[in-house]
Image (cartoon, coloured by chain):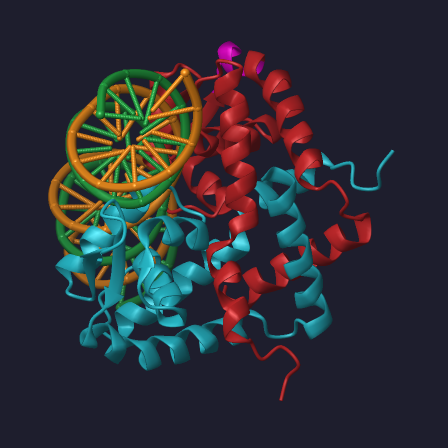
Chain colours: A red, B cyan, C orange, D green
Amino acid sequence: MSGNQFKRGELYSFITGLASTAIARRLQKNFKQHDIDITIEQWSVLYHLWKQDGLSQQELCSATFRDKPSITRLVDNLEKLQLVKRVASHTDRRINLIYLTDKAALLRDQTMDMANRTLNEALTGVTADEIAVCKSVLQRVYDNLK
Amino acid sequence: MSGNQFKRGELYSFITGLASTAIARRLQKNFKQHDIDITIEQWSVLYHLWKQDGLSQQELCSATFRDKPSITRLVDNLEKLQLVKRVASHTDRRINLIYLTDKAALLRDQTMDMANRTLNEALTGVTADEIAVCKSVLQRVYDNLK
DNA sequence: GACATATAGTTAGTTATGCAACTAATTCAA
DNA sequence: TTGAATTAGTTGCATAACTAACTATATGTC
């Protein structure tokens, strides 16, 4: 028998992912307290565009582990907030490339600092080794279900 | 400096909790394939009632890390599906005690097996020690943000 | 070139989430 | 014992999730 046969009492927290939702909720609160009116989900899209601008919606799907309709509407709402713009690709007109606006650039440093502080607060007392184990496990879980 | 200063590239997966959502999504699919028409969120409420029947809505909030309106509506929908019943407490009439129906009892073994199989599939190649580390980290993160 | 297939994105419908404001029942204190 | 504060639960509103069905563009094969 493999060593990871699950005990019932331990099952739930793995399925609902309390830690990540707790961190996300805290970060959302910090945003609100600083009068930053975007949702965590919107922020997660911006986060990937800050790493690389001009991604297609499909690439945002893969990056954020969301499905296509979710990205469609997140981009809709980010466009309403004038934080991104859809630009049709010249080489393939099916594709929308998503570009950040100047307004989005302003948000970056503010929210990145906040996210890092929130994360460090959440991870107080957790060692680098433990984080490495968690990351590795997350990745393998994801691959197992791919 | 504490050892867990976060590198930007690692930040995102912690905040969005991809592993748990991936597992939840897979379990939801398995439910659907077996013509079990409940959502993961509804199942997570049943899960706690299977451990202990007759919890109040407030106790379900704590157990599932959800807020009160979420539980109100999950219980609404579970009641429509005739899987639970609200019973006003005799000692404190503000309190609704939530009781499982016979129909819910039928679901238990089916879905528990499915959940355990899904979890074991997701955790293939992950050792018991690694799971223990993840659990411990999850718990500390939650406590840090309490 | 024409038709089948695949890919990018949108729309519709149901469920869930978070917040804020609300009602009703209970408790506590003057 | 009355009136303030607390607690349990509900309702309304905006956003987001998944599925399925849809349009439009591109690709590939005969």
**Picture coordinates of residue A128 (x, y %)?**
80, 48
For the C terminus of chain B, the quadrant is top right
Locate the N terminus of chain B by quadrant: top right
Q: Main secondary structure of the magenta part?
A: helix
Q: Is residue A104 magenta?
A: yes
Residue at far right of view = B1
| Residue A70 visible (yes or no) | no
Pick whichever, A132 or B84, lies toward us: B84
Front position in the image: A16 or A56:
A16
In the rendered image, which quarter is residue A119 located in? top right
* Lateral position of residue A115 relative to residue C20, left or right: right
- Give the answer, above or below, for where B136 lies relative to B103: above
Residue at horizontal 55 percent and vertical 60 percent from the top: A142
Rendered location of residue A50, percent (x, y):
59, 26
| Residue stretch rendered in magenta on the structure | A100-105
Q: Is residue B115 visible?
A: yes
- Of all residues, the one furthest to the bottom in this rendering is A1
Residue at image location 57% in from the left, 11% down from the top? A106
Residue D7 horizontal/vertical position (percent): 38, 39
Seen in the picture, residue B67 relative to A32 is either above or below; the reply is below
Q: Is residue B115 left or right of residue B141?
A: left
Q: Position of residue A133 (x, y in %)?
A: 73, 58
Near-viewer residue (C2 or A24): A24
Residue at image location 39% in from the left, 76% down from the top: B112
User: Is B11 drawn above or below residue A2 in the view shown?
Assistant: above
Q: Residue at point 37% right, 61% down?
A: B44
Residue D27 in the image: above or below residue B110: above
Query: Number of callouts in the render?
Result: 0
Verify whether residue A54 appears in magenta.
no
